[in-house]
């Protein structure tokens, strides 16, 4: 599980930061890659990574502003050209289906793979193999969604040393112990599963917010994220401006991370009013409240380790 | 008058070549810039030039394939953001108006400037100040147009030395000579304009083709171009493939340049099957037939000088 930030700017591209897109690599888990938003030139950014467009099988769109969707038609076309055959599913706000279909039709684009477009709604839970994606509606003036990606918990491991101590040697019985509440051995011992199974391993949680103002309202949704990705379009002192434009500040993102008991915060969607040299103090504003914060830059990536 | 090649690839972007777009800088002539096609990430390419989006006041689209139009919504939005107030006119094939309007509506984009979208047709002549743009329909499977940009001829200059030789000194009479077929001087000389005006200066002609097969059919349209810009998606030996996919080869573009008596040919829209190291031999194929050929690369530019 790894996040790759393909575009980290707000509204317009700059030389340093492209408009929004984030890849979530699930190569070990599902041999697939998911995309969150797809601003213009996302496919160009991908050319500078090891990501293969044909491995992208789910795209989640937070909202319909141009800097989050204008790269979609081109990416879909190129995925065809680059030998994609597998189903691709796009999840997004109302209007996403018409947007994609109109663009493909107008450009005479015929995809070589099946495309499914699903409009999401608040409270929905989307199941994808061993992952579940929960959908929350944010506060951005137009319909805008956040996605909480939750890996299924893994059952604990068999406590082999403990079994062997009791004289129970590896064999078909190990499978039985794992799969039943209790098992009787040949020599009449009653073994309870709970005594021979280690602690279950909690699945990882990555919560990716779309654009929003007043993010602290969404504490519950962000709760216990291993990685929380949140916009910080503005600096701390611009809280009023942020509210007016339906965006968040560095500090608000950090407060959300703290209040939601998240492990790590990554701020992104940085206004093009800020230059590369501003990254440090913007980051410091957030770290004052939530020390384990990073500021995303284009093509930066972060592995999400289980606890 | 200067051409800047913003994207020179066919179909999909590569690391070296972006998809189609060409800027025609008319800064001295009209303080404006025209764009021909607008593939995805054209606005990103512009960030690496001195071009100001607000100076772009005309965009000509050759056809509706995605690699020629998917950058339009983003460029239009960013032009707003970067302080464009002046009218922008888009000229293009049927469908361009619906495409642009749907994208702006879907993304909730409100432009800060007036936008006019004009659908073109074969044989049309569009007047733009001292330039005229003629429209030809090409052979690309879907409606696809070429644009011939013709600068108005400039009247000849007054032959001042000759006038002074005859004792006619600079003064208001010079203006009269320029503006009338003949003028009588105070001392009764009859001066015919044709005797005192130099040769008129022919306006420059830049012809920009869209994608097409069998380009030699369009000799008349390309006639006497100072600069002819033409696609060469395929190498010489792939003439059959080119025909099948409605494209041209290096050689066909060169033959068109020769037969149309053009001064200079620039080939572009190079298939991504070719690498940077193939440029030389592709160019040589064309030069064998038309020596004054160049192959466009991204961000290359060429001044168009009058003869
Ligand atoms: Zn945004
Ligand atoms: Zn093309």
Image (spheres, coloured by chain):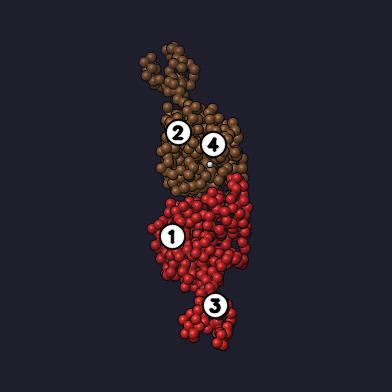
Chain colours: A brown, B red
What label sits on residue B172 in the rendered view? Answer: 3
Q: Nearer the viewer, mark 2 or mark 3?
A: 3
Mark 4 and 1 residues: CB-CB less than 8 Å, in contact? no
In this view, the residue in front, A256 or B174, is B174
Q: Position of residue A203 (x, y in %)?
A: 47, 28
Tell me where residue A87 sits by quadrant.
top right
Is residue A204 something one can see in this rendering? no
The residue most toward the front is B186
Labels 2, 3: one chain: no
Picture layout, residue A53 above or below residue B273: above
Measured Cα–Cα span from mark 4 to mark 1: 45 Å
Judge the density around disc 2: few (<14), some (14-19), many (≥20) Cα neighbours within 10 Å.
many
Q: Nearer the viewer, mark 2 or mark 1?
A: 2
Measured Cα–Cα span from mark 3 to mark 1: 46 Å
Labels 4, 3: one chain: no
Measured Cα–Cα span from mark 2 to mark 1: 43 Å
Measured Cα–Cα span from mark 2 to mark 3: 73 Å
What label sits on residue A240 in the rendered view? Answer: 4
Picture layout, residue A217 above or below residue B99: above
Mark 3 and 1 residues: CB-CB less than 8 Å, in contact? no
Q: Position of residue B190 (x, y in %)?
A: 56, 86
* Residue that badge 1 annotates: B300
């Amino acid at each position: 599980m790894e996040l790759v930030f393909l575009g980290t700017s707000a509204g317009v591209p700059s030389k340093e930061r492209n408009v929004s897109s984030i890849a979530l690599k699930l190569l070990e888990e599902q041999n697939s890659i998911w995309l969150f938003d797809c601003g213009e030139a996302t496919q160009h950014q991908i050319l500078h990574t090891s990501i293969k467009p044909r491995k992208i099988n789910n795209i989640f769109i937070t909202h319909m502003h141009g800097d989050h969707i204008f790269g979609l038609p081109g990416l879909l076309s190129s995925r065809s050209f680059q030998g994609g055959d597998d189903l691709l599913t796009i999840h997004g706000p109302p209007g996403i289906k018409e947007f994609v279909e109109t663009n493909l039709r107008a450009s005479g684009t015929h995809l070589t793979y099946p495309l499914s477009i699903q409009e999401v709604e608040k409270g929905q839970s989307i199941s994808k193999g061993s992952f579940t994606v929960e959908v929350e509606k944010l506060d951005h003036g137009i319909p805008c969604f956040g996605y909480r990606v939750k890996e299924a918990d893994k059952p604990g491991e068999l406590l082999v040393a403990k079994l062997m101590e009791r004289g129970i040697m590896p064999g078909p019985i190990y499978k039985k112990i794992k799969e039943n509440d209790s098992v009787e051995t040949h020599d009449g011992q009653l073994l309870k599963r709970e005594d021979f199974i280690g602690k279950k391993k909690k699945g990882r949680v990555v919560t990716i917010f779309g654009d929003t103002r007043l993010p602290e309202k969404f504490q519950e949704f962000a709760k216990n994220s291993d990685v929380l990705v949140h916009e910080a379009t503005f600096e701390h002192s611009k809280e009023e401006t942020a509210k007016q434009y339906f965006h968040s500040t560095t500090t608000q993102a950090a407060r959300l991370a703290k209040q939601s008991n998240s492990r790590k915060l990554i701020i992104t969607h940085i206004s093009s009013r800020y230059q590369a040299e501003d990254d440090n103090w913007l980051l410091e504003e957030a770290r004052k409240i939530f020390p384990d914060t990073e500021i995303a830059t284009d093509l930066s990536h972060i592995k999400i380790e289980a606890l």
